[in-house]
Amino acid sequence: MHLLVVNPNTTASMTAKIGAAARAVAAPGTRITAVNPADGPASIEGYYDEVFCLPGLLAEIGKGRADGVDAAIVACFDDTGLDACRTVLDGPVLGLCEAAMHTATLLAGSFSVVTTLRRSVPIIEHLAVRYGMAQRCRRVRAAEVPVLALEDPGSDAAERVKAEVQRCLTEDGAEAVLLGCAGMTDLAARLTRETGAPVIDGVAAAVKLAEALVGLGLKTSRLGAYAAPRSKPYTGVFADRAPTAPAD
Amino acid sequence: MHLLVVNPNTTASMTAKIGAAARAVAAPGTRITAVNPADGPASIEGYYDEVFCLPGLLAEIGKGRADGVDAAIVACFDDTGLDACRTVLDGPVLGLCEAAMHTATLLAGSFSVVTTLRRSVPIIEHLAVRYGMAQRCRRVRAAEVPVLALEDPGSDAAERVKAEVQRCLTEDGAEAVLLGCAGMTDLAARLTRETGAPVIDGVAAAVKLAEALVGLGLKTSRLGAYAAPRSKPYTGVFADRAPTAPAD
Amino acid sequence: MHLLVVNPNTTASMTAKIGAAARAVAAPGTRITAVNPADGPASIEGYYDEVFCLPGLLAEIGKGRADGVDAAIVACFDDTGLDACRTVLDGPVLGLCEAAMHTATLLAGSFSVVTTLRRSVPIIEHLAVRYGMAQRCRRVRAAEVPVLALEDPGSDAAERVKAEVQRCLTEDGAEAVLLGCAGMTDLAARLTRETGAPVIDGVAAAVKLAEALVGLGLKTSRLGAYAAPRSKPYTGVFADRAPTAPAD
Amino acid sequence: MHLLVVNPNTTASMTAKIGAAARAVAAPGTRITAVNPADGPASIEGYYDEVFCLPGLLAEIGKGRADGVDAAIVACFDDTGLDACRTVLDGPVLGLCEAAMHTATLLAGSFSVVTTLRRSVPIIEHLAVRYGMAQRCRRVRAAEVPVLALEDPGSDAAERVKAEVQRCLTEDGAEAVLLGCAGMTDLAARLTRETGAPVIDGVAAAVKLAEALVGLGLKTSRLGAYAAPRSKPYTGVFADRAPTAPAD
Amino acid sequence: MHLLVVNPNTTASMTAKIGAAARAVAAPGTRITAVNPADGPASIEGYYDEVFCLPGLLAEIGKGRADGVDAAIVACFDDTGLDACRTVLDGPVLGLCEAAMHTATLLAGSFSVVTTLRRSVPIIEHLAVRYGMAQRCRRVRAAEVPVLALEDPGSDAAERVKAEVQRCLTEDGAEAVLLGCAGMTDLAARLTRETGAPVIDGVAAAVKLAEALVGLGLKTSRLGAYAAPRSKPYTGVFADRAPTAPAD
Amino acid sequence: MHLLVVNPNTTASMTAKIGAAARAVAAPGTRITAVNPADGPASIEGYYDEVFCLPGLLAEIGKGRADGVDAAIVACFDDTGLDACRTVLDGPVLGLCEAAMHTATLLAGSFSVVTTLRRSVPIIEHLAVRYGMAQRCRRVRAAEVPVLALEDPGSDAAERVKAEVQRCLTEDGAEAVLLGCAGMTDLAARLTRETGAPVIDGVAAAVKLAEALVGLGLKTSRLGAYAAPRSKPYTGVFADRAPTAPAD
């Protein structure tokens, strides 16, 4: 099985960390290809950054399609561009937030999320509503740690995340905690050990759910919004990105 | 007051129609500038097309900011890129679906939506959930009319839309109907007259709500996900789109 | 355009303040008529007071209809009698709570409300549920200020409201704040300036939304609960209030 | 135990029918007083009629309070004025819709409602949302029978109601049916017998729930919106209705 | 009227207390039979204990059916086995949580629950969701009192429950409080008196609601999940528990 | 990895079919042990049958625990006893309905369910509400096929299921379909092929999700309702089933 993991930002060290996390949980027969676009933001912190990772993200998904990958993962907790990616690839596409929330509810009655900055809180709250998880999600908390501080060994980012995870358990009464940024992927195992609660990393969760869906032989439904893009002209710098599938 | 109306697709005839509809309802002191990006899809029919209108859409919003527009409208019923646009402009930004749904609930206990193609139905259903309108929205229906057929005077598009509007009233029991595509903007007045129900066009609704918000002197809140983009490096073809605001 | 603003209580100084607030935001061509009934409570603080403002409120709406007003506003944050008023006037009728909540969600991901007394909190919470706003409404807070204290320049009412507005931002994490009483209409601009968050006054919001709806040429739907009252006999002191429209 | 049943419209024959239905289910020690106001509409069909029954309804509740009734019932399926009545009486006050919906969910997984006219459908749908019953309520149907036709032995009202009850079972898959008008109170037993499903009359349900609450020795909570009305001046025709309780 | 009250655990002192509480509120003509199974757990604290009370609970309901009881009550706040019991008895079956929540919402705009141990909190939260009460339920709190400590006069259980009840009022802003364990049945009247808020005991609430439903002559609907069990073979130790009703 | 699959009914041929389905999708290193209790009902069709499978189900889970299984699956679409099983095993426990619903929402915007008998419809609807899936679940349909008819090659069960699956797509507009009974596990692949929509079998879905969770090294959270059972006496026939873990 071949899984494509796309870090939608352009920070290669983060892609490497995500790839390592993915490989650490992948099944023996699973090949992980971790990539990031060449074009776009160094980190995704809010809606503006999301926009400029999308063309590069879709290009990587398109390459994966040409390479015959079985499934893909959008390695950003905002589930940036997840819907669009599903229209491109026949195989399943997973997002970190969606994967982590589904995983949590199979193991616990409730969960909280620890993300990076306050501006990401409403984004994740909205995803919880969309995924039907609002009633299980106690609270989305910001550790007030910029994404790239997680890449800096000298920062106190890990300590701040841990403190916030503990508040999820003591103040929110959550039974599990989600780490709300792909850059936190290396913290989950230790925090699970230290807190006694399931602390869930979206990268790992998405890899295992992708393996599960591929193993089931199921593909994304084409009957609704994930139908293949309709053929039509695109102009200007995106002219060569026009869908060429026959119109339905 | 200066309102920027951005048709996020590249079809100039549709931009002209939208601009005319906007001017037809604008208050005497309101100047409407209707534009579309040069780059991107000729129509927006699903998540894939959305991606490739976004960089151009944000560029138009950025130009509007430089020109000192008071508010902006994203003239697509999928509310494509609405959140990102709000991080760029200080003044209010409105989407057609959001504007039309809010307008409907001020006039009627329930509504249905008539959109173009089936693939857009789940997109609009999701917006209804996000906007808190799911319990007021009876049904989202597709007239199975491609967006650009609405630009073709020889097509039977208008008849198909009308037939579906009537089904909203008789089969769904809706008290109002939303036209779920910017390309239907010229049909609303006639359908209101012919059916006796409020038939709401998102373009017109968004213009009037934008005037209302500007008139209130209110701006988009910067305290959550609509904070100004954080300063950071962008690479590749989007290098010049990097936010330059001081980090918060 | 002629807008009727009905303060449903009988305190003329409050009517004057509401009228001034309405005129301050009205568009050049908008005429504001601000009235209050002669009969009924001096302030509306809970469900009992609501009952005794209703016949007078409807009488004022009926006079407005005779005068050909284009729209009406019920200037009470409990949206008292809003539904009944919609059955009388063909043009749109707005309530303060409804207008303020819709306005807030066009500008912010979440909001809190500051009202007068604890007894009004469940009333506003119920409106939030009805309007689909419960998931966007962080909290409804009472400043424990009686309505008429807001009319008394010597009271500390403004300070108490301001303190509660700040709690909305710091404790609730709200991105916007609604002032939950028509008597607070003069505080909004200053609080917006001082807190940096959109602080929304229902009177102003309702005026601008009413202008928007009239500008759209839309009327309240007659297909559901807002159908014109059925003709039937009324007896006793209300005999002359019987609807005379032909039965449907 | 003394229960006051107030038919809020002025049709004495309907009051008599409601009183008989109440007495038919009342426990041996329960005394039923069934009254209607002298002032107001002959039937309640929508929001406008509701307004003009309220002062009379509250007067009857006030008399009941002076007479020491233990609980009261507002015998209208729109639960007209229910909230206001709760601020007046210390003992419990029940509405027909609220009572019937609670009763249904103790006996069945889902229910539908059959009411009189289409205009009442959104009113009852709104009550279902407020009472938390929306997910159990399959559908609210109108038999298109005016309220007073139910008082006319020559009309086909009973047949139309029965046909609609059967549609609830066959088309909606409802497990129980509520009769959505006090004037249908005499049809419930027969329809239960003929359909094999619980067909629930709000009058009977409210009487038994009122007995239950009185038997529990519980009173309406005064901690929220049901606090006793605050003392304040009322002017004009309602001057003598001003609350005289000490302000809180 | 003959009501069967089944304490599903095997602690006879608790059955006696529950029976006394039931008799204290029962109407003059109501006979209360309070029993507990011989087989199973001494207390029910979580899902595991629930399983082993069920066969005994159903046996008691079956005996009640043979004895011609008119209704039954499952005297556990987790509403253990309530659904299964409804398939056995023709008359109504009530659970404590369901009864208490319905009672609360007839008297108050919101409520909180005080239960025994943290592990029961998610169970009750889930019931609130299922019963449509989530939006009225402010919070479910654990007093951290084991069930059987409530049977021990020397414990500080009553004090801990009272302290938590007060937190419901001051911290949650609840207007009523539910005692979330059958073993707290003797505390309700005193706490109502001492706090001024309705403090609701599920045993008493269930008895009065059962009387109400029997008085209405209504039975559990057989049209959905409460249909009589289908006839089929059971094997092993439960062979004699196989349903013998004719298959539908 | 060792997965225990417990068919909670006593029909060995169904256990064999479920075991084969599980093995067909299991990863190379996964060992499947499929068992059923000796005691209890031959099929589970409603709440009554559920009760009598539970002690046997928990015994099988307990044996699995002693055998060191890594995870367990309750192979009934009603998710019978799922919560209790989670308190016994440290590793994850999956139910068919929960697994299938989560799987569906990773692949499609909406789904419908086809189950056996009408009496199971409300049970599955309730699970959808509990799992947060109600807004994604279009409809739960009954094929009116008894569970054991699925074991009878001569019955028309497969045809009836297929017809109902097609109605999910054409009438409900669902984008995916869940087979709502473990006995339908052999129909999924063919129906996926024939309809072009993802048709999801809960057995397969649960196996792959269980592998995913075990691969993540995560266990059920002990912080809420899934805490290990408290030590306490059990009496009678269940005396030897008393939990022996130290009380928390």
Image: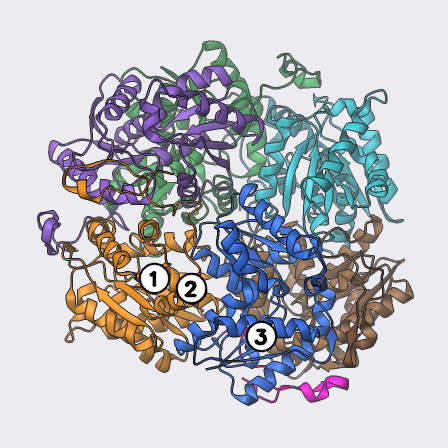
Chain colours: A brown, B blue, C orange, D purple, E green, F cyan
The answer to which quarter of the image holds residue C243 is top left
Q: Residue furthest left?
A: D240
Mark identifier at residue C213: 2
Mark identifier at residue C71: 1
Tell me residue E186's x, y (percent).
32, 33
Q: CA distance from mark 3 to mark 2?
A: 19 Å
Q: Is residue B174 left or right of residue F2?
A: left
Residue designated by label 3:
B19
Q: Residue shown at 77%/61% (left/top)?
A: A87
Q: Can residue A78 be seen by looking at this rendering?
A: yes
| Label 1: which secondary element | strand
- Mark 2 is surrounded, within 10 Å at the Cα level, by few (under 14), some (14 to 19) or many (20 or more) other residues, namely many
Q: Residue shown at 76%/46% (left/top)?
A: F70
Q: Can residue F62 be seen by looking at this rendering?
A: no
Amino acid on which disc 3 is placed: Gly
| Label 2: which secondary element | helix
Amino acid on which disc 2 is placed: Leu
Check residue B229 for magenta coloring: yes
Seen from the viewer's position, the closer of residues A145 and A46 is A46
Seen from the viewer's position, the closer of residues B114 and A172 is B114
Q: Are marks 2 and 1 on the same chain?
A: yes
Q: Residue shown at 24%/70% (left/top)?
A: C19
Magenta part of the protein: which range? Answer: B224-248
Q: Is residue E50 left or right of residue C48?
A: right
Residues at marks 2 and 1 touching, judged by CB atoms closer than 8 Å: yes
Question: Which quadrant is home to the C terminus of chain C?
Answer: top left
Chain of the residue that carries numbered disc 1 in the rendered image: C
Q: Is residue C61 above or below residue E106?
A: below
